[in-house]
């Protein structure tokens, strides 16, 4: 029997803009099984990144419920929220912006370990192992973000996310700011991590070829609403909704 690691139930997010209210996400539900990858696709402004930010509690939920490993995390704060970040991590689109430019990559990767009072020698060894897992040599621990390429910085960002051994990794357009060759390398890294079987992925993406290659299930969004949801091959090869058909046709 499959195990659900992350579940969203009737998620809604409303942003206030003066006297107007913008409904960014409207009644979206989905479930992510352990060891699997769920892709969330749709045009710009469809609500993809808002869902990612709600999942990681960077944006408050207006309505609905988020369940992580059987626990309701919809409104957690303080210590409970910090504990949540041991289980769910996010890799952002612009890796350079997610690191402190005044600190080395090694410091950034080891920060969560330092916060957990892991001893220095053990921390350094763990950082080296994480870098190696992500295809970087140990010398990158001493480099600053501006001293590495975008692809190398994104690998370091993935290493940092993995430092706490999360059960869910959210990738919010994690390859879209990289050139095609580097995208391929990052995708291969994600595939390798997925094959380990212990990590589940939520992939926010506009690249349907990548979704088809990496994702087990896919959720299609339009104007904040879920218009199609199911097994990736079924949705992409036999779409039921006109919007999904247009979305697929636009990249062919």
Image (cartoon, rainbow, N blue to C red):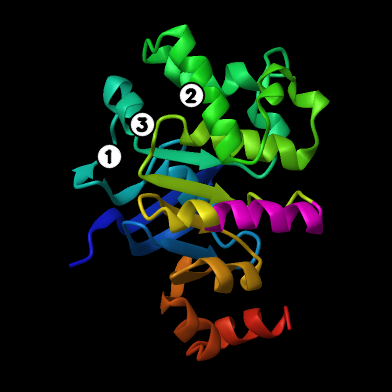
Residue at 64% across, 30% down: 98
Q: Which residues are magenta?
A: 179-191
Q: State which quadrant residue 213 falls in.
A: bottom right
Residue 86's disc is 3
Q: Secondary structure at mark 3?
A: loop
Against 186, residue 84 (above or below) is: above
Q: Is residue 203 visible?
A: yes
Main secondary structure along the magenta-highlighted residues: helix
Magenta stretch encompasses residue 188: yes
Q: Residues within 10 Å of mark 2 (few under 14, many from 20)?
A: some
Q: Secondary structure at mark 1?
A: loop
Q: Of marks 2 and 1, which one's residue comes earlier in the chain?
A: 1
Magenta stretch encompasses residue 189: yes
Residue at 67% across, 40% down: 154
- Per the model, the C-alpha gap separating discs 2 and 3 is 16 Å
Residue 187's x, y, as percent? 63, 57
Residue at 38% across, 32% down: 85
107 and 223: which is toward the camera: 107
Q: Residues within 10 Å of mark 1 (few under 14, many from 20)?
A: some
Quick one: quadrant of the N terminus? Answer: bottom left
Quick one: quadrant of the C terminus? Answer: bottom right
Q: Is residue 237 left or right of residue 66?
A: right
Q: Is residue 45 left or right of residue 39?
A: right
22 and 100: which is toward the camera: 100
Identify residue for label 1.
73
Which marked residue is nearer to the observer: mark 3 or mark 1?
A: 3
Q: Is residue 22 visible?
A: no
Q: Of marks 3 and 1, which one's residue comes earlier in the chain?
A: 1
Identify residue for label 2.
126
Q: State which quadrant residue 37 falls in.
A: bottom left
Residue 112's x, y, as percent? 45, 21
């Amino acid at each position: 029997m499959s195990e659900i690691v992350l579940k969203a139930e009737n998620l809604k997010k409303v942003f206030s803009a003066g006297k107007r209210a913008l409904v960014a996400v409207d009644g979206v539900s989905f479930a992510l099984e352990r060891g699997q990858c769920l892709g969330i696709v749709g045009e710009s402004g469809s609500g993809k990144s808002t869902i990612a930010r709600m999942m990681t509690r960077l944006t408050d939920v207006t309505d609905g419920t988020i369940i992580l490993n059987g626990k309701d995390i919809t409104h957690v704060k303080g210590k409970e929220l910090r504990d949540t970040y041991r289980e769910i991590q996010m890799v952002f689109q612009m890796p350079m912006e997610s690191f402190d430019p005044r600190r080395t990559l090694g410091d950034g990767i080891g920060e969560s370990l330092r916060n957990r009072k892991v001893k220095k020698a053990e921390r350094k060894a763990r950082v080296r192992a994480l870098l190696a897992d992500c295809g970087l040599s140990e010398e990158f621990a001493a480099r600053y973000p501006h001293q590495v390429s975008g692809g190398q910085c994104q690998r370091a960002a993935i290493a940092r996310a993995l430092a706490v051994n999360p059960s869910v990794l959210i990738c919010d357009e994690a390859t879209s700011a990289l050139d095609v060759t580097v995208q391929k390398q990052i995708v291969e890294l994600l595939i390798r991590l997925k094959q380990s079987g212990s990590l589940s992925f939520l992939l926010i993406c506009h690249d349907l070829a990548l979704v088809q290659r990496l994702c087990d299930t896919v959720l299609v969004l339009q104007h904040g609403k879920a218009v199609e949801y199911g097994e990736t091959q079924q949705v992409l090869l036999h779409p039921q909704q006109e919007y999904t058909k247009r979305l697929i046709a636009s990249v062919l």
